[in-house]
Amino acid sequence: MPFDVQKLSVLAYANGFTLWHYRNDADSRAAILAPGYFDSSAHLLRRGDMLLTRSSDSFAILHVTTNTGTSVSVSAIV
């Protein structure tokens, strides 16, 4: 399934950093980590932000590594 902005919420914000929560029980961890998944939220997410994500098969902490204004890349923090 595609990214759903209604499932994205702010947990904390300070000094230009935002900690987000994203829950989508219909998508797998692999789908959420796939390139382009968060592109439609490029206007919200900034490089350096973190996302606590819950998917159909896992919980992950993601780091926004790049945001070009139209493309967002994330990586899992292990």
Image (cartoon, rainbow, N blue to C red):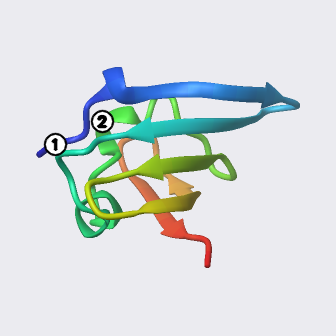
**Circle 2 sits on which residue?**
40
Front residue of this view, candidates 58 and 69: 58
Residue at the (43%, 29%) spot, across then down: 8
Secondary structure under badge 1? loop
Looking at this rendering, what residue extends furthest in the top direction? 6
User: Vertical placement of 39 versus 11: above or below?
Assistant: below
Mark 2 or 1, which is nearer the eye? 1
State the SS at label 2: helix
The residue labelled by disc 1 is 2
Is the residue marked by circle 2 packed among few (<14), some (14-19), or many (20+) residues within 10 Å? some
Picture quarter with the C terminus: bottom right
Q: Amino acid at mark 1?
A: Pro
Task: Classify 13 as above or below 46.
Answer: above
Which amino acid type is shown beneath numbered disc 2? Ser
Relative to residue 53, is residue 16 drawn left or right?
right
Q: How far apart in space, not on screen, are marks 2 and 1 (Cα)?
A: 9 Å
